[in-house]
Image (cartoon, helix red, strand yellow):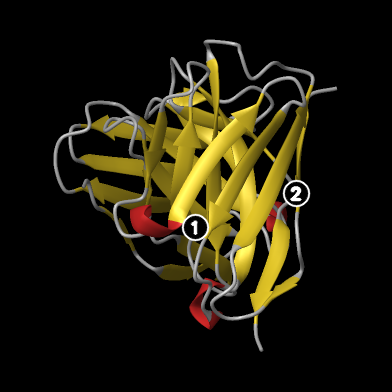
Amino acid sequence: QVTLKESGPVLVKPTETLTLTCTVSGFSLTNVRMSVSWIRQPPGKALEWLAHIFSNDEKSYSTSLKSRLTISKDTSKSQVVLTMTNMDPVDTATYYCARMDILSGKYSLWGQGTRVTVSS
Amino acid sequence: DIQMTQSPSSLSAYVGDRVTITCRASQSISSYLNWYQQKPGKAPKLLIYAASSLESGVPARFSGSGSGTDFTLTISSLQPEDFATYYCQQSYSTPLFTFGPGTKVDIK
């Protein structure tokens, strides 16, 4: 079964660093036809693309959040990790990881999402 | 960065209605445009990719068209399970990807 599952803290304090993990199963992070993104959605608001990592370890980041984001992967653990520094209440959101099929550019598979609240 | 806009931001429709949602890119993206449906509390679901290709398992009442900067998602006969929010997403400017602001479809 092909799945992605996000995990991480439910609550973080302002100024802290958030670390989220996306564990994938049923496909390999070394597959050149696939790559993984992190996408978030504040309550009641739209989807926002955050970061992306390819099988060759090439990475890309949202222009507006680039200074705060780091994406990495551990192929042996089938995990993609996102860190976001200096968290603020406006970063409260559901964070999704999603698999992109490279040739089409479509997100064909999504995790269930993990809700993160930023509050003191 | 390529910016995506959608119109309308929301609409109300009856079951059985034909519904059309528009997505516009700030520059040409060829046909690198995908459509997703999201229901409350759920992850988005892919409906259409490459502007007009129907994802496997998606009902044929959904269709997509367009190229360049202007795209449409059409639901030919709205069903009760179609009430949701719809997002477009461009994959032209790889490795930077963008979603539209969404269109909420609710019951009239």
Q: Residues within 10 Å of mark 2 (few under 14, many from 20)?
A: many
Mark linked to residue A32: none
Badge 2 sits on which subunit?
A
- Residue under numbered circle 1: A47
- Please indicate whether residue A86 sits to the left or right of residue A31 in the image: left
Residue under the image location 44 percent in, 60 percent down:
B102
Residue under the image location 55 percent in, 63 percent down:
A41
The residue lying toward the viewer, choosing from A47 and A10, is A10
- Please indicate whether residue A67 sits to the left or right of residue A117 in the image: left
Q: Are marks 1 and 2 on the same chain?
A: yes
Placement of the C terminus of chain A among the 4 image quadrants: bottom right
Name the spot of residue B14 as percent of width and height, x first.
57, 65
The residue lying toward the viewer, choosing from B99 and B73, is B99
Name the spot of residue B23 as percent of width and height, x first.
31, 49
Q: Residues within 10 Å of mark 1 (few under 14, many from 20)?
A: many
Name the spot of residue A46 as percent of width and height, x first.
48, 64
The residue lying toward the viewer, choosing from B32 and B77, is B32
Residue under the image location 61 percent in, 38 percent down:
A98
The amino acid marked with disc number 1 is Leu
- Residue under numbered circle 2: A112
